[in-house]
């Protein structure tokens, strides 16, 4: 994995390095930031939207399973140079668990995506590469801590809440001041007992919108169980929404 991590780090510097240096060399120079944004828009061509996401956003995708969500965005944008897609699993484990992972990773690599494996959502702000950047959108679809009890059991719910709060705490440090943190999550019982709005508020994020999630907006996306012998199987998403948060300090 060390060799793979080095190669991915190199790609990341190529993809994000110039824009990042332009925007962060001196945060007090607003005009320089505006020039940098104009350059990025010019380089990408016309804006393309997929669901809530645009090719002008710098997007961090967290907890990808088979990378089909990332691949869906990349194909629709026609480029993934604005995206960093991460997984908790190693590359080797992904290929063992998910039948479509190889194809999706290949698409992303061809389209210029930065791919980073073995990223823990609860410590990602300390990651040697990711901590260098800020993002316009940070996205975590259907977070799940793994099934150790029944879904409605209190210990299981506590594990999920610990994961989500840890993600929010790290995302707060990584999202741009005017950026957004998105979680797509089931809204029925017992998933509603996670109280994700409260978890977000406790770390300084405020809900600005909740939109019903439509899987059909993202062609090719396959939500995966990710755990156990059925890890490559999809699961019924039922009633679910994308919850969108911003820093409380930016809403004053």
Image (cartoon, grey):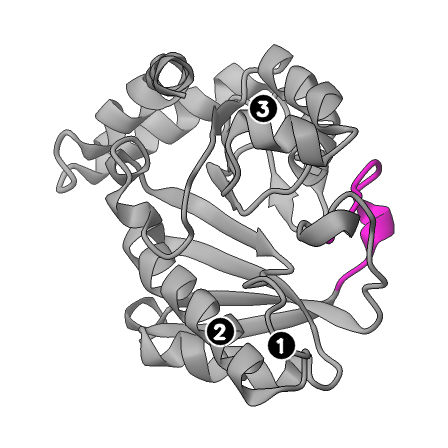
Question: Mark 3 and 1 residues: CB-CB less than 8 Å, in contact?
Answer: no
Instruction: Kindly identify the residue that appears in the image at 54 percent across and 47 percent down.
Output: 63
Badge 3 or badge 1: first in the primary sequence: 3
Question: Residue 103: image x %, image y %?
Answer: 74, 20
Instruction: Residue 80: give its label.
Output: 3
Q: Helix, strand, or loop for circle 2?
A: helix
Instruction: Kindly identify the residue that appears in the image at 70 percent across and 21 percent down.
Output: 102
Label 1, label 2: how far apart the Cα atoms are:
10 Å
Q: 105 above or below 199?
A: above
Q: Which residue is mark 1?
A: 149
Q: Nearer the viewer, residue 13 or 34?
A: 13
Decide: few, some or many residues near mark 3? Use Cα within 10 Å; few <14, some 14-19, many ≥20: many
Is the stretch drawn in magenta largely helix, strand or loop? loop
Question: Residue 225: image x %, image y %?
Answer: 73, 53
Q: Is residue 51 visible?
A: yes
Q: Helix, strand, or loop for circle 1?
A: loop
Nearer to us: label 3 or label 1: 1
Question: Residue 96: image x %, image y %?
Answer: 68, 30
Q: Which residue is mark 2?
A: 159
Q: Is residue 92 left or right of residue 22?
A: right
Q: 163 above or below 139?
A: below
Q: Which residues are magenta?
A: 213-225
Instruction: Kindly identify the residue that appears in the image at 30 percent across and 20 percent down.
Output: 17
Label 3, label 2: how far apart the Cα atoms are:
33 Å
Q: Is residue 78 visible?
A: no
In the rendered image, residue 202 lying in the magenta stretch gets the answer no
Question: Residue 251: image x %, image y %?
Answer: 36, 72
Nearer to us: label 1 or label 2: 1
């Amino acid at each position: 994995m060390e060799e793979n991590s080095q190669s991915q780090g190199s790609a990341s510097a190529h993809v994000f390095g110039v824009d990042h240096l332009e925007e962060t060399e001196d945060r007090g120079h607003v005009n320089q930031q505006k020039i940098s944004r104009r350059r990025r828009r010019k380089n990408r061509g016309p804006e393309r939207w997929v669901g809530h996401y645009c090719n002008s956003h710098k997007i961090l995708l967290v907890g990808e399973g088979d990378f089909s969500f990332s691949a869906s965005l990349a194909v629709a944008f026609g480029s993934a140079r604005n995206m960093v897609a991460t997984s908790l699993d190693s590359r080797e484990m992904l290929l063992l668990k998910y039948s479509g992972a190889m194809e999706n990773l290949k698409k992303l690599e061809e389209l210029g995506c930065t791919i980073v494996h073995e990223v823990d959502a609860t410590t990602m702000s300390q990651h040697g590469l990711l901590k260098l950047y800020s993002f316009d959108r940070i996205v975590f679809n259907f977070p799940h801590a793994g099934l150790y009890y029944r879904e409605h059991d209190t210990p299981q719910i506590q594990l999920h809440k610990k994961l989500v709060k840890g993600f929010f705490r790290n995302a707060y440090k990584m999202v741009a001041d005017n950026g957004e943190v998105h979680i797509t999550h089931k809204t029925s019982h017992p998933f509603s007992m996670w109280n994700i709005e409260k978890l977000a508020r406790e770390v300084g994020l405020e809900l600005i919108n909740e939109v019903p999630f439509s899987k059909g907006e993202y062609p090719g996306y396959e939500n995966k169980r990710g755990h156990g012998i059925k890890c490559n199987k999809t699961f019924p998403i039922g009633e679910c929404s994308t919850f969108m948060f911003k820093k409380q300090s930016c809403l004053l």
